[in-house]
Structures are given as C-alpha cells and as structure tokens.
Amino acid sequence: VKGVAAHGHGRANTDAERTREGALDGTTRLEITKAINNGLIEKFNGTVKEGKEAMVYHALQGTESGGHDVAIKVFKRIQEFRNRGDYVTGDTRFTRKNFSKAGPREQLGMWTEKEYRNLIRAERSGVPVPKPLSYNDNVLFMRFLGEEGWPSPQLREIDIKKGSKKWTSLYEQTMEAVQLLYTKAHLVHGDLSEYNILVCPSKLMFDDPDDKEALQVALIDFGQAVNHKHPNAEKWLRRDLQRVQEFFERMGITCIGLEAAYHYVTTEGAPLRS
C-alpha cells in the first residue's frame, strides 16, 4: 500500500528450530496436527510474532478455513497469567469459574476461551477484528491478517507523514471500532494501544470493499477485554481512549478530547465530530 509499510516485522519462519521454541510443546503440536487433519490448515509455516505471553504462527489455508490463511496464537505457560484475575473474576460470563484458584493450565484455557468468545462477539457486531475460527486448550485459530506469510503492521510501525489525512482516517476508524465494540458487542478492550491495532488493506477485512487497497484498522489481542458492565470497565475504557489519543496526537492529528471521546464511544450512533 503506497505510503505505508507493506507488512509488519517477522515473516513466517519455516526454520524447525524456531517452531520448537516457546509455546510449541507436545499438546500444542497435537492441536496443530488435528487442525491439519480437519482441513482447517494445510501447512504449518512457523513464527510470525513472539510476545511475552503468546506466540503467533502462520499456516496456509485449509479447505475449512474460509479461503484465507490462518494465524495460530499459542499462549505460553507462564507466571504472568496469575496476575490477570481482575479481567476474569469481574466478568459475569465467567462467574462460575474461579480464575485465581485455578491451576496454570486451567488459567491458560480460560484465557484462550475468553479471547475466542470476545472475538466472536466483536466480529458479529461489525468490529474489524481477525475472524475467530476455533480454539482448544491454549491454542486459538483465527484468520491471518497479512499476505504471503507477512503479518500486517502494527499501527506504530506504519510510515506515514505526520499530519497526513491518512492518519486522520485511521484515527476515525479506530474510534468507530471502539464505539462498535462498546455499543454493539458490549465489550471494553482493556489494553488498547498502537501495539494491538493492525493496519491492512481493506480487502483483508471485507469481502467486497469499495477500495481494496484502502487502509483499514483491525483490533487484536482480546484476552483481557471485558463486558461493559464489569466493575472496572469505565476505568479501562478511559485508559484505552487516553492511549489512542496520545498516539494520534504524536502523529499530528487533532483529536476530540477524552471526555468527548468517552461520550462518543458509549453513545450508539453518535457522530465523532459535530
């Protein structure tokens, strides 16, 4: 796409040594084998992103993946998940599950299920997110946002001149996505920033866009997203909006202000700018 980075860092690595790192234990390998046997993926290619909590891998599309390559997100069995109880305990959808008292393996399973269910709600509500396909244990399968094994770049990675109208468009898209997430999906992301907003050609998000090469944001990383009735939902939503505003202001964009942004996001059908 002219004027932006063509892709994010880390094309799918086919080196077998890389796939043995981090989260690819025997259980994960079994889930990938099942996905191949079930036609969800044809070939497992390797790592495209490594984070503190999860690894993301690329796989070639299978007969059951809807005509698109697949991203495989594998949550690592690490200590950090014990500190995520606040995002689960106060969520009414998980009232029967005690996250803090669960073992590490069960916590990972709950976190994976939570991200999958959040993505389902967001996608059905029209929020631009990678389409979730399936999950089991600590492994989540979803549509791969990228081309030829290259992931779409994070918002922070794209190269656009400060003050450009393209930044204005991306800001407006981001705010619209957060509004849809709140008013339609009834979710608050809870950790939104330039690190978990991707930018890709609209053809990767929509089946028949007016302009296939137009830039389109996509929100990712929904494990911590909570119902908008969660006790901390307002605090986390305001934090999300502050991070979004701070980033776009650094890019030379005039934002609408935090209170106006909060009103816009929480009011269905409200215009962004009066």
Image (tube, grey):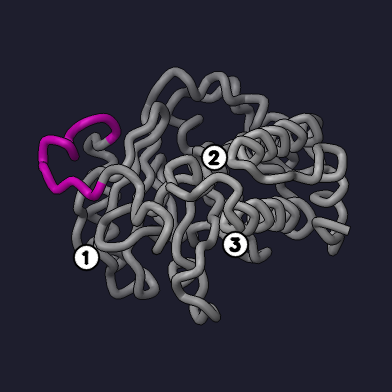
Examine the rendering and report whether any part of residue 121 can be seen.
no
Dot in front, 2 or 1: 2
Label number found at residue 194: 2
Label number found at residue 42: 1
User: Is there CB contact under 8 Å for labels 3 and 1?
Assistant: no
The numbered mark, 2 or 1, whose residue comes first in the sequence reads 1
Q: Main secondary structure of the magenta part?
A: loop
The image shows residue 114 at horizontal and vertical percentages of 57, 43
Query: Which residue is pictured at 44% across the width and 67% down the height?
Result: 204
Residues rendered magenta in the picture: 11-23
Closer-to-camera residue (74/150): 150
215 in relation to 224, above or below: below
Q: Give the alpha-carbon distance from disc 2 to disc 3, as whole Å.
A: 20 Å
User: Is there CB contact under 8 Å for labels 2 and 1?
Assistant: no
Closer-to-camera residue (156/232): 156
The image shows residue 186 at horizontal and vertical percentages of 75, 52
Q: Give the alpha-carbon distance from disc 2 to disc 1, as whole Å.
A: 32 Å
The numbered mark, 3 or 1, whose residue comes first in the sequence reads 1
